[in-house]
Image (cartoon, rainbow, N blue to C red):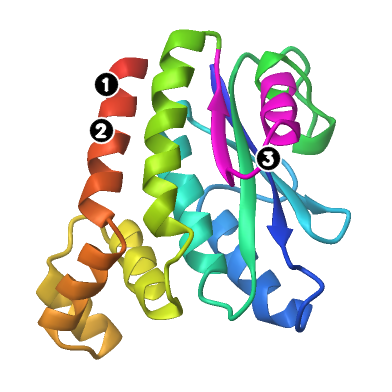
Amino acid sequence: MIAIITGDIINSRKGEVETWLPLLKEVLNQYGQEPADWEIFRGDSFQLSIAPKEAILAAFHIKSAIKQTKSQDVRMGIGIGKIKYNSNKTTESNGSAYIRSGECFESLKKQTLAIKSHNSELDTTLNLMLSLALLSANNWSNTVSEVVKKMIENSNTTQKEIAHLLNKSQSSISEALKRGGFDEIMNMNNYYKNQLF
């Protein structure tokens, strides 16, 4: 089983590509090698191949990187399934995970993140939870995004240590995480991992 995240950058033509492209690449590099595990194509689209249990948090990690820009956001469809054909380029591989990811991405209307697996009942629950999580995540400021990103990247670190890393006060870190709905997103991620495995 594998998870495929297919995404594109919202408002990619607003401002300079140099503002969001390095942020996207930096996060994708934390999940594997290009082009076997991730690729950027058509200028502003990307695909990431990842372990299913990491998929939802990785999606929020990507979002927290892109939301540090002034005008960009990201749309992503997560597909969970099998690989039938494994190429050395992720965009040339095939299987149910790739098909579901593409279908999920194509079906995104107002929602910017959704998931599709073999279990439609679980998908319904998760997509409802994601739509609620996005109520805050879609409105993250660049400050909140920066703090959320650091927390995801340093999961065993205290707020005090994050405050030191970002040269901010602990209270401002705590406030940013609260505004960003970070605890709720982590609770949803734990629920997702427990349902999956």
Does the rendering let one see residue 89?
no
Q: Secondary structure at mark 3?
A: loop
Mark sitting earlier along the chain (3/1): 3
Question: Is disc 1 surrounded by few (<14), some (14 to 19) or many (20+) residues within 10 Å?
Answer: few
Where does residue 19 sit, x and y in percent of width and height? 67, 81
Mark sitting earlier along the chain (2/3): 3
Dot label at residue 133: none
Asked if residue 104 is among those painted magenta in the image, a careful observer would answer: yes
- Measuring 59% from the left and 55% from the top, which residue is drawn there? 28
Where does residue 156 sit, x and y in percent of width and height? 18, 56
Question: Is disc 3 surrounded by few (<14), some (14 to 19) or many (20+) residues within 10 Å?
Answer: few
Which three-letter amino acid code belongs to the residue tagged 3?
Lys
Q: Which residue is farthest right? A: 42
Residue 137: quadrant of the picture: bottom left
Q: Which residue is mark 1?
A: 194
Q: Which residues are magenta?
A: 99-117
On the picture, is 155 further left or further right than 88?
left
Viewer-nearest residue: 33 or 105: 105
Q: Which residue is mark 3?
A: 109
Contact check, label 1 and label 2, Cβ < 8 Å: yes
On the picture, is 4 further left or further right than 169?
right
Q: Nearer the viewer, mark 3 or mark 1?
A: 3
Location of residue 13 with respect to 123 vertically, above or below: below
Distance between the alpha carbons at the discs numbered 1 and 2: 6 Å
Question: Is disc 2 surrounded by few (<14), some (14 to 19) or many (20+) residues within 10 Å?
Answer: some
Where does residue 69 sit, x and y in percent of width and height? 58, 78
Location of residue 41 with respect to 106 vertically, above or below: below
Q: Which residue is mark 2?
A: 190
Where does residue 166 sit, x and y in percent of width and height? 29, 84
Which three-letter amino acid code belongs to the residue tagged 1?
Asn
